[in-house]
Amino acid sequence: MIFDGENAVDILAESILEYNITEGISICNTKWNEIYKASRNRLAIREALNFLSKKRRTTSELEQWLQKSFSNNETLHATERMQELKYLNDESWVLDYQKSQKARGKSKRYLANEFKKKNISAYIQAKALDRHNDEIEALWLAHKKFKSLEKLPFDRQKTKLYFYLQRRGFNNELIISITRQLILDN
């Protein structure tokens, strides 16, 4: 802790060592601002590491977290550092999300909405959604759901399956096609 007149200012130990700050030293305003900025940037990086160590996050999530305690410049500095260290990569996050159970059986529209919530760039979204196949996902999901509907009358099966797939964001044409195909096959 450094005392500046009557005000106490927190400075990290690394900054004290780097700038060789000792008791009774006098520092000009320019140098003080440099020390303070470096210390705040280090603190932002430390917070970013702590936040990212708990769970995989997107750039937007990290920025929102850091902006609660840090300025825009400090947030930007920490975010860029995390990207340099490869601890933060939205494209990689999207790929992992698509491979996860959370994305299984979901439509492009559903995934696009999830990516938009996480402020994933349009370019990364488009790239990811090009790899996604709604028909395969809807068919997998319909097969899974259909097992629980086998004992119901034909019309109830069709209705329940239709609304189940619709809630997951699939379009009407695809739902009708898959519903017909499944019910005819069984």
Image: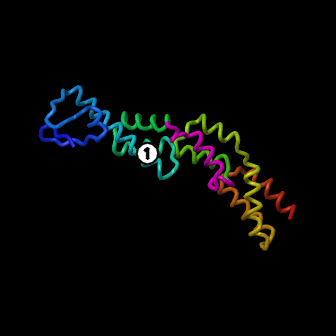
- The residue depicted at 73 percent of the width and 46 percent of the height is 133
Question: Which quarter of the figure is the N terminus placed in?
Answer: top left
- The residue depicted at 45 percent of the width and 35 percent of the height is 81
Determine whether, in the image, residue 125 is placed left or right of residue 29: right
Magenta part of the chain: 85-105
Q: Which residue is under mark 1?
A: 49
Which sits in the foreground, 178 or 91? 91
Which sits in the foreground, 19 or 33? 19
- The residue depicted at 49 percent of the width and 37 percent of the height is 85
Question: Which quarter of the figure is the C terminus placed in?
Answer: bottom right
Residue kind at label 1, given as amino acid type = Leu
Query: Residue 35: where, in percent of width, then height?
Result: 27, 32
Few, some or many residues within 10 Å of mark 1 (<14, 14–19, 20+): some
Query: Residue 67: where, in percent of width, then height?
Result: 37, 42
Res 150 quadrant in image = bottom right
Query: Please, what is the dominant secondary structure of the magenta stretch?
Result: helix
Q: Is residue 60 magenta?
A: no
The answer to whether 178 is drawn above or below residue 29 in the figure is below
Q: Residue furthest bottom?
A: 151
